[in-house]
Amino acid sequence: MDVLIIEDEESAFKNLKRILLEIDSSINIVSWLQSVEQSIDWFQSNNSPDIIFLDIHLSDDLSFRIFESVKVSCPIIFTTAYDQFAIKAFELNSIDYLLKPITLKDVKKSLTKYHSNINSNSYDKLIQDLHKISINKNYKERFLVNKGDELRIVLISDVSYFYKDNTTFIVLKNGYRYPIRFTLEQLNYLLNPTNFYRINRQFIVSITAISKITLWFKGKLKLRLNPEFKETIFVSREKSMSFKKWMDQ
């Protein structure tokens, strides 16, 4: 079986690849794609695989945008970290999905469904539903954070960026930072993609937080944020093109 994995998180890709090969060592991972743009390019020059594992939210857009540019004729198993609206759409349309973190049991169940009764012709309705969901989606406008024994409300307009250390932190324009209960994967679904972009595995940044961009070696971009972060921050070569398009929209 030829399997295509479209997933912008390297750790999630490696986990899924390991599980697939553990289930069936003859499975062929034909490619690993990380963005809508990269996926569209791939489909325009390659034959469809037998099945696709597709993350809902990619680095540059929601993944259903792929289907607006190319015709995909094979079954798809969607993966998601958080979006309950999308999960509801899958349930209504009997399309399978995997909720991260993905387990061996989950993948086995999905592959069994694939081998038995998945029908790729039902995706048109799903794509329409997802498009409506994205248009009508209400993005997060504020966060409730703890400071000592106090609770404080942080407006999204006051946020510069989010970063992941041992936990996730929200950093404000005034330099204050607070731990929050969300992962970066969850924040990807909650934040308006017009204003926020996940530049790498550690950071989601606001467009207003970027104070300087420097061209770096091997196609990478070096960023300076405001407030400044203690370590050097890079946008990978793979994400640099979609990142520049995001800034220029």
Image (cartoon, rainbow, N blue to C red):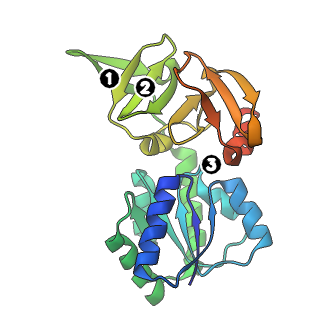
Q: Is the residue under label 1 in contact with that under label 3 (CB below 8 Å)?
A: no
Q: Secondary structure at mark 1?
A: strand
Type of residue at label 2? Ile
Secondary structure found at label 3: loop
Residue 42 found in image quarter: bottom right
Q: Is residue 40 above or below residue 145?
A: below
**For the view shown, which residue lies furthest in the bottom direction?**
116
Whether label 2 touches label 1, CB < 8 Å? yes
Residue at mark 3 to residue at mark 1: CA–CA distance:
28 Å
In the picture provided, is 5 more to the left or to the right than 41?
A: left
Which x, y percent locates residue 27? 53, 81
Residue 78, position as x, y percentages in the image: 49, 65
Q: Nearer the viewer, residue 148 or 14?
A: 14
Disc 1 crowd, CA 10 A, few/some/many (<14, 14-19, 20+): some
Point out the frontmost of discs 2 and 1: 2
CA gap between label 2 and label 1 equals 9 Å
Measure the C-alpha gap from mark 2 to mark 3: 22 Å
- Of the pair 204 and 229, the residue shown nearer to us: 229
Residue position marked by numbered label 3 in the rendering: 61
Q: Of label 3 and label 1, which has the lower sequence position? A: 3
Kind of residue indicated by mark 3: Asp
How crowded is the residue under tag 3: few (<14 C-alpha within 10 Å), some, or many (20+)? some
> Three-letter amino acid code at disc 1?
Val
Q: Which mark is residue 170?
A: 2
- Which residue is the extreme one toward the top? 174
Q: Which residue is label 1 attached to?
A: 145
